[in-house]
Amino acid sequence: MKKGDNLIFNLSVEVISNQMIASEVFKIKFFSKEIASVAKPGQFIHLKLDYEDILLRRPFSFYRAEKETFELLFQIVGKGTAFLSKLKPKEKVDVLGPLGNCFSLPNNISRILLVAGGIGIAPLRFLAEVAKKKGIESYLLYGTCSSNKIVDLADFKALTKEAFILTEDGSFGEKAMVTDLLQKFAHEVAPDYAYACGPRLMLKEVVKILISLNIKVEIALEEVLGCGLGVCHGCVCQTTKGYQTVCRDGPVFEGKSIIWE
Amino acid sequence: MKKGDNLIFNLSVEVISNQMIASEVFKIKFFSKEIASVAKPGQFIHLKLDYEDILLRRPFSFYRAEKETFELLFQIVGKGTAFLSKLKPKEKVDVLGPLGNCFSLPNNISRILLVAGGIGIAPLRFLAEVAKKKGIESYLLYGTCSSNKIVDLADFKALTKEAFILTEDGSFGEKAMVTDLLQKFAHEVAPDYAYACGPRLMLKEVVKILISLNIKVEIALEEVLGCGLGVCHGCVCQTTKGYQTVCRDGPVFEGKSIIWE
Amino acid sequence: MEPDLSVEISGIKMKNPVMTASGTFGPKEYLPFVELNRLGALVVKTVTLKSRPGNPPPRLRETPCGVLNSIGLQNPGVKVFIKEDLPWLSQFDVPIIVSVGGETVEEYLKIIEFLNETKEISAVELNISCPNVKKGGIFFGVDPDEAANLTVKAKKISRFPLWVKLSPNVTDISLIAKVVEESGADAVSLINTIVGMAVDVKTFKPYLGGITGGLSGPAIKPIAVRMVWEVAKRVKIPVIGMGGIMNAHDALEFFLVGAKAVAVGTANLVNPKAVLEIISGIKKYMKEKGFKRMGEIVGKIII
Amino acid sequence: MEPDLSVEISGIKMKNPVMTASGTFGPKEYLPFVELNRLGALVVKTVTLKSRPGNPPPRLRETPCGVLNSIGLQNPGVKVFIKEDLPWLSQFDVPIIVSVGGETVEEYLKIIEFLNETKEISAVELNISCPNVKKGGIFFGVDPDEAANLTVKAKKISRFPLWVKLSPNVTDISLIAKVVEESGADAVSLINTIVGMAVDVKTFKPYLGGITGGLSGPAIKPIAVRMVWEVAKRVKIPVIGMGGIMNAHDALEFFLVGAKAVAVGTANLVNPKAVLEIISGIKKYMKEKGFKRMGEIVGKIII
Ligand SMILES: Cc1cc2nc3c(=O)[nH]c(=O)nc-3n(C[C@H](O)[C@H](O)[C@H](O)COP(=O)(O)OP(=O)(O)OC[C@H]3O[C@@H](n4cnc5c(N)ncnc54)[C@H](O)[C@@H]3O)c2cc1C
Ligand SMILES: Cc1cc2nc3c(=O)[nH]c(=O)nc-3n(C[C@H](O)[C@H](O)[C@H](O)COP(=O)(O)OP(=O)(O)OC[C@H]3O[C@@H](n4cnc5c(N)ncnc54)[C@H](O)[C@@H]3O)c2cc1C
Ligand SMILES: Cc1cc2nc3c(=O)[nH]c(=O)nc-3n(C[C@H](O)[C@H](O)[C@H](O)COP(=O)(O)O)c2cc1C
Ligand SMILES: Cc1cc2nc3c(=O)[nH]c(=O)nc-3n(C[C@H](O)[C@H](O)[C@H](O)COP(=O)(O)O)c2cc1C
Ligand code: FES
Ligand code: FES
């Protein structure tokens, strides 16, 4: 993973659109030249949501960023995301970002593997887009619990060389978990590099499998965040270098550096 | 003052309309047969506002109630009222009421004096309406700080025999405070009974003046409320009978029974 | 099969582990909203020996996610309570817990003597933790020796099981709990309110007539949960948890750290039906999770 | 005329009475948002003798209007601090207050000895109130004798004014403040966080890796204001107030009850510009009300 840009903005930005695109999953678009022009895949934005007794900001990965706008993809899991889902065009949100480091796309690679579980697809879409621009071929393995959770299928098909979709209940694609088929898929694709995002348990398994195949993997981690700026040390995860902050040393980590509990 | 009806409802009721009718003053209308049919002038409704970290309900006097709807008049003073001002038709609010006692309109009276300061006009409009139906003549002395705070002027003119409007800055009517002209006005009107609502300091003065003129006066008091049901003893005021609850023994008290600090 | 929510506290059988916290629930006033027979138990407003007028207003102030109150134990005194409230209360099939408060040991004991003459009550709760009275109250709750002395004497004379309600305004609440247990208490309830204060920067005056007040509500929940956890680890008598319980999930937090029952306070002021909703919420949770008895939850925190 | 916000605390002249609370503000990281020269003072994250890895994650949990943290004084140790952070900090025209924490009296004293060798700092703040470390920390803050002993020894050797940061997890904070004053402290700051806990009812596990954590934020403000009031009445040394200050009005509450300065903690995590907004808010308030100096506000509560 790479250091993100050092430019960090704290702005009030306007919602352009906000739509449900899968069950309890929303895509929200904001206007901000400043942020859109420097955001990198893997980085996130920290939103201040003035709702009920919410105190801390809420972090979301960039799902897209182009010229003057950026998009987030989010799933409703609590009151912050519930509130976010109700924001309407023209409403404003106080944002802090881009924050964190970003996925690395070393120059010498030509095909990458993206492994997404559920809403973990968010940072990987942005990565696939940037990879494509660089002429790097992406192969996507994307699992959700059910067909109604799958987002932007056509978009992913266009961005990737191959998109392999699974559901846990078999309602779309193969009935399997990402980790069930990863070994085979990774073997076939034989990527130079892999990137994964999803639930913690999945990531742990994904890293194990890819390491056993000798494929370098970067993962985007989640933790409850405070400041988002590397100050409070509230968001650490255990790594081979000791505790590292998810917000600043991460959210992207080398798979092999994480010490899973 | 009289005991209110014993029927108390805890319902989720729908907003019918909500409009600004003066500077920072709103009129909101709700649909509820149950409540509208039993509400009495002087009684109030206790609103649960799900906004930010608001915990306690907020009380508002009935401004009108007819058949299936009731109206409140409120002024924005903090976050509860700010939120209330943004409610849109069809949104729902959890309400508890009608609560408290009500103004008495003894049978043998024929002309009453209403004294209102600012938003204190709210409970008096409802009283004027009921009085009119009973064939009792109302005389209104109504003061606000400025012309942009005056509400429903035409309405009050229709409901009362005479409506005398003052502003503190002279931007409408005479430049005076209610308490400046009360003595003269009360003397001319010579009412059987008087009713007042407004800021605490004004009420104290109004009661003093009217008592000196030997005119019986009932006042509607405010306090920070908790339960609204007479349980927590959080809302007491000092009276000749000791501490009494504004929410249950009041909000209407005989002017002479209050011990002002 | 319906989960069994019943619990037994100091020999009192309760249909479920949810009671009303002292001073926050009016059985008569809440009757239109709450079927009293469905409550686990009803803890009445603290009674004192003589009637008390309470503190000067204003008595309430909302703070972030909390409420400061300075009621000051306004109540008509134990005799009026026994004559006027108790007979009415006894028509219901719900354990009545009488909270008692005093300025001296003698006052506490006198009240218990009065209560000893009644038949309708299930337990006495010693309120040694009210922060809103000048004398007595919290004084007994912050000093282990005073707490022990009062508990021993109260236990000696009380015909009823003795609960002691602890103050959170102490360095080590589990020490007070332990001392009180050793002195004969049959259960401890905690927490009472935390002393707090708010000032109006427009007038330079405190918002409360009593200057300071007791903080309750969601704001104090993390503190209450921690204290219940500390106490439950240290004593064997039942622990009754409270402080900021607004819904079933909040109540479950208290059970997990070791509360055998919970009490609901501030939530009643906001939502008259709070207690009932919390009871059904707990039942629903147990059904979904497949729990059959409270014993499968109480103290089952995984560390 | 512009109001004069300056204050003097233990001989340190500050442009205004607003500082950053220890552990919640990163001077380097906040530089894009905050002109450091505009701060009243900068209290750095507590340093310990050796580097500390801190507590196991998760370390943060939001609670109603509050935050529980279990950071556990993660820091690189005093030597790294002096070598790497202090030189950079000294380029700014703002008093640097170094918060120190230890497991034993000796550790505290050793750190002070290291700091004595530096020139860039304005005061030392003894953190005797961190609830998130197993040994030391809060232990010194809840026992008057321990607090006195440590303060006397620290004062004896410190080249710099000595501030002591008090724990709210005590029965009588003004007693500790008094004892600490008598032991030579030049100022007291309060409150540190209140021990709290939250449990996930889905997993039965505590939300924090450290099980309990320290509660901060608006939820604790009424408790903090009350404690500052109690302490300010009892001691003559300056009182630095903190706990839930999110805006200028919150800060003013603390001044009115007697805080000569305030510190802002959790608010920094939410809004990097919080301190600056609070400073301008206080200035605006003073202008509107016609106040010229902080002395016209500090301790001016009308009872
Ligand atoms: C770097 C980063 C990037 C993220 N990107 C995305 C994204 O692109 N799309 C998306 O849907 N989600 C993303 N998340 C997770 C998202 O931040 C949380 O879902 C959100 O904060 C929950 O807020 P809430 O108020 O709805 O839930 P809450 O009511 O606060 O909590 C609901 C549940 O979410 C957990 N939670 C709360 N806050 C956080 C947090 N800050 N981080 C992780 N879990 C939390 C709680 O423990 C609880 O179990 C990301 C998290 C991180 C750290
Ligand atoms: C019986 C009764 C009837 C009332 N009728 C009306 C009415 O018809 N129209 C109207 O505009 N207002 C009325 N009020 C006052 C109204 O309840 C308050 O203005 C409202 O609760 C403020 O809420 P907030 O969240 O906007 O303000 P907050 O942010 O809570 O506070 C703003 C200011 O209002 C004060 N305040 C807060 N809560 C109350 C309360 N419960 N009672 C009194 N003051 C409070 C605060 O001390 C503060 O100074 C009535 C009050 C009572 C007790
Ligand atoms: C308005 C009010 C009155 C109270 N009166 C009493 C009382 O008389 N006796 C008592 O032991 N506790 C009293 N309490 C404390 C509550 O019983 C309870 O311990 C505390 O409020 C914490 O619970 P909560 O956060 O659910 O309210 C009172 C609390 C409030 C808010
Ligand atoms: C994330 C975090 C880290 C903290 N670290 C320290 C610390 O290292 N040393 C210390 O004395 N206080 C520490 N505190 C306590 C704060 O300095 C402050 O006393 C407390 O949070 C109350 O203020 P607040 O409500 O404004 O946050 C920390 C608080 C938080 C939230
Ligand atoms: S959230 Fe504060 S260091 Fe990461
Ligand atoms: S608000 Fe509870 S008694 Fe009046």
Image (spheres, coloured by chain):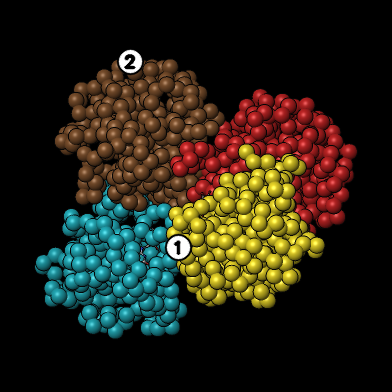
Chain colours: A yellow, B cyan, C brown, D red
> Circle 2 is placed at which residue position?
C156
> Circle 1 is placed at which residue position?
A148
Q: Residue at x 32, y 34 (%)?
A: C292
What chain is tagged by disc 1?
A
Q: Amino acid at mark 1?
A: Asn
Q: Position of residue C160 (x, y in %)?
A: 27, 22
Residue D153 falls in which quadrant of the image? Answer: top right
* Pick the front one: B30 or A22: A22
Residue A84 in sight here: no
Query: Is D185 on the left-hand or right-hand side of C60?
Result: right
Element type where label 1 sits in the image: helix
| Outermost residue toward the left in this view | B108
Work out how far the residue at label 2 is from the one at label 1, CA to CA, in angstroms. Answer: 66 Å
| Outermost residue toward the top in this view | C156
Residue D186 falls in which quadrant of the image? Answer: top right
* Pick the front one: D1 or C249: C249
